[in-house]
Amino acid sequence: MHILDERVSGCRACPRLVDWREEVARTKRAAFADWTYWARPVPGFGPPDASLLIVGLAPAAHGGNRTGRMFTGDSSGDVLFAALHAVGLASSPISVRADDGLTLHGVRLTSPVHCAPPANKPTPQERDTCRTWLEAELEILRPTLRAVVVLGGFGWQATFPALAAAGWTVPRPRPAFGHGARVTLSAVDGGPPLDVFGCFHVSQRNTFTRLLTPAMLRQVLSDGARAAGLDVSGAPGSGESQREH
């Protein structure tokens, strides 16, 4: 996995994303004026033998693009790591920088697009170009991977083709995204099945409007962790309806 992460970090395949991530690093945000931005593709974060994978959308311009670690340094990451810690999957509820000592327990974080995109909107071509990295990551994780939690509809659409390429059978038509959705995929070689869970993305828009609450997020993470055979703390329940988004 270390070799893959290094290769991801050196990718320059999408000119628009390269220009944007480097421009953000030059201009910076006033609050981070003293930072040297990572300004490269952000590799996955977590152990190479994880049994649970969490798939997002893409690094944030002043989050992962600044810190060099997935979901680290922005409000979305604050929400996600707090929930991961609450259910026993992260050593800390706070993720500030790549060298802050935080560790993940049996879970790895990744995204279908590894560069920060303008307006947080990768193009379909950029998504498809970057898919080879997700496919390679899934192939490495395949011996231990038992569950995937996908954050948001973009990640959902991007993840299933990668799962198919990495050796799981994806039903047709492709399962529809919804918060709390659960799909079980069989392995083409007869290996263990893989459970895929849908969850609203941890974006500011979703958390500020309470489309996604902390309890809803903890519930999906707990369900995913249990499907992956991981021990989780407590038994959170959302008590809220599941809506598509």
Image (cartoon, rainbow, N blue to C red):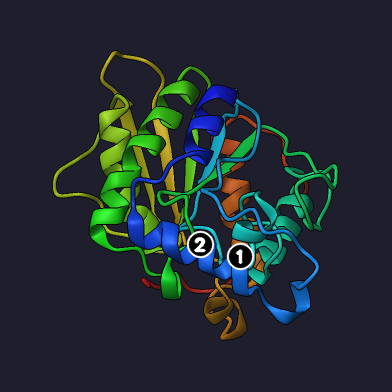
Residue 180 is tagged as none
Task: Name which quarter of the figure residue 169 lies in.
Answer: top left
Location of residue 192 with respect to 51 vertically, above or below: above
Picture residue at 53% right of the left edge, 40% below the top: 9
Residue 208 vertical position relative to residue 200 in the rendered view, above or below: below
- Disc 1 to disc 2, how far (Cα)? 6 Å
Q: Where the C terminus falls, by quadrant?
A: bottom left
* Label 1 close to label 2 by CB (< 8 Å): yes
Q: Nearer the viewer, residue 163 or 113?
A: 113
> What residue is drawn where x is 50% and y is 27%?
4
Residue for badge 1: 25
State the mark number for residue 21.
Answer: 2
Residue depicted at x 69% and y 55% = 67
Residue 171 sits in which quadrant?
top left
Image coordinates of residue 193 in percent, x first then y, are 39, 26
Most foreground residue, 232 or 58: 58
